Amino acid sequence: MRCLAVAGVAAALAPLPAAAQSAADAAAACSAGTNLPDAVCACVGERAADELNDTQRQWYIHAAGGETDAAQALLGSMSASEIADAATFARTAPMECVRGG
């Protein structure tokens, strides 16, 4: 029993996999930048991890978190299509998550 408790603590302290960390960071940015409920921002975070590439996701995290200079700097490394997709995501994902998906 004690081994299970120690294993549980070790698992809790282990770093999150990159995708999970990306989802957590995007959810935190959503929470910081909006008045949306945590469950909605968790959905946005999961979708960001699934639907956006690393640069788009970092842009979303900075933009949603109000870090406009950092978000602006990332635009130079994105194609027009990537920018359009990231902007569409930022505009539509929160409402889609409010609606349940």
Image (cartoon, helix red, strand yellow):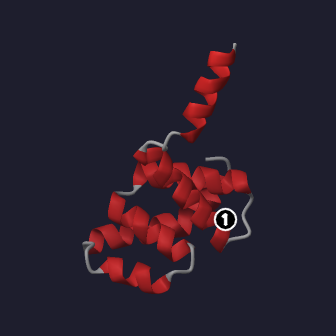
User: In the picture provided, is 32 more to the left or to the right than 26?
Assistant: right
Q: Nearer the viewer, residue 50 or 69?
A: 69
Mark 1 packing: few (<14 Cα in 10 Å), some, or many (20+)? many
Q: Is residue 26 above or below residue 19?
A: below
Give above or below for 83 relative to 26.
Answer: below
Q: In the figure, residue 2 lies in which quadrant?
A: top right
Residue at 62% x, 25% y is 6
The residue at which mark 1 appears reads as 31
Work out whether residue 90 or residue 77 is closer to the camera in this orientation and state it.
77
98 or 59, which is in the foreground? Answer: 59
Residue 9 at x, y = what percent? 63, 32
The residue under the point 33% across, 79% down is 75
Image: 2 above or below 60: above
Question: Image quarter for residue 41?
Answer: bottom right
**Quadrant occupied by the N terminus:** top right
Q: Position of residue 90 (x, y in %)?
A: 51, 68
Q: Please indicate whether residue 42 sits to the left or right of residue 50 in the image.
A: right
* Amino acid type for the residue under numbered disc 1: Ser
Residue at the image position 37 percent from the left and 71 percent from the top: 84
Q: Position of residue 93 (x, y in %)?
A: 55, 60
Residue at image location 74% in from the left, 58% down from the top: 37
| Callout 1: SS | helix
What percent of the width, then of the height, locates residue 39? 70, 50
- Count of labels in the image: 1
**The furthest residue to the top:** 1
Left or right: where 9 falls relative to 49: right
